Image: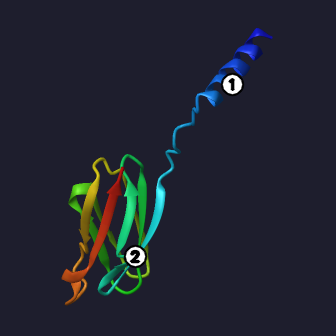
């Protein structure tokens, strides 16, 4: 009985003090489509310290995604999907590029990743 009373007291105190359980450790999933010569969406926003999985899909030829500052590097073949998971540790704006030559417009393929607090 004392155990139950203790648990009730503990839970009541936690609720009154505004305790909220920690965020889920399940990564946020973001789908990014790569096609000549763009990423869609071209910009994404993620949160510092929270894991993120980018699902990279290709609609036409092999593509890649590289963002050195965030430790992202993956490639995807035509009509396939690859995943890369990362946890950003620093706020800022980072530019990803296509990591697999995909034609004359390859150099213009950019994905902007905004990391907020």
Residue 91's x, y, as percent? 29, 52
Dot 1 corresponds to which residue? Answer: 12
Q: Most extreme residue toward the top, as rendered?
A: 2
Judging depth in this view, the residue of 12 and 25 nearest the camera is 12
Residue 74's x, y, as percent? 31, 65
Dot 2 corresponds to which residue? Answer: 41
- Secondary structure of the residue carrying tag 1 is helix
**Labelled pair 2, 1 in contact (Cβ < 8 Å):** no
Observer able to see residue 53: yes
Task: Categorize mark 2 by other alpha carbons within 10 Å: few (<14), some (14-19), many (20+).
Answer: few
Q: Most extreme residue toward the bottom, as rendered?
A: 104
Residue 70's x, y, as percent? 27, 56
Q: CA distance from mark 2 to mark 1?
A: 44 Å
Image mark for residue 74: none
Residue 45's x, y, as percent? 38, 62
Observer able to see residue 84: no
Residue at 26% across, 61% down: 93
Its colouring scheme is rainbow
Task: Categorize mark 1 by other alpha carbons within 10 Å: few (<14), some (14-19), many (20+).
Answer: few
Residue at 24% across, 67% down: 95
Residue at 32% across, 80% down: 62
- Secondary structure of the residue carrying tag 2 is loop
Is residue 91 depicted above or below 99 in this figure? above
- Which of disc 1 and disc 2 is earlier in sequence? 1
Looking at the rendered image, the disc whose residue lies closer to the viewer, 2 or 1, is: 1
């Amino acid at each position: 009985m004392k155990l139950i009373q203790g648990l009730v007291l503990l839970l009541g105190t936690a609720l009154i003090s505004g305790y909220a359980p920690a965020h889920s450790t399940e990564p946020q999933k973001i789908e990014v489509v790569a096609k000549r010569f763009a990423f869609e969406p071209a910009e994404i926003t993620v949160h510092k310290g929270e894991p993120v999985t980018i699902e990279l899909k290709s609609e036409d030829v092999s593509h890649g995604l590289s963002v050195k500052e965030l430790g992202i590097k993956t490639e995807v073949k035509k009509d396939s999907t690859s995943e890369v998971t990362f946890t950003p540790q620093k706020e800022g704006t980072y530019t990803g590029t296509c990591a697999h030559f995909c034609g004359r417009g390859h150099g213009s393929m950019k994905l902007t990743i905004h990391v907020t607090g």
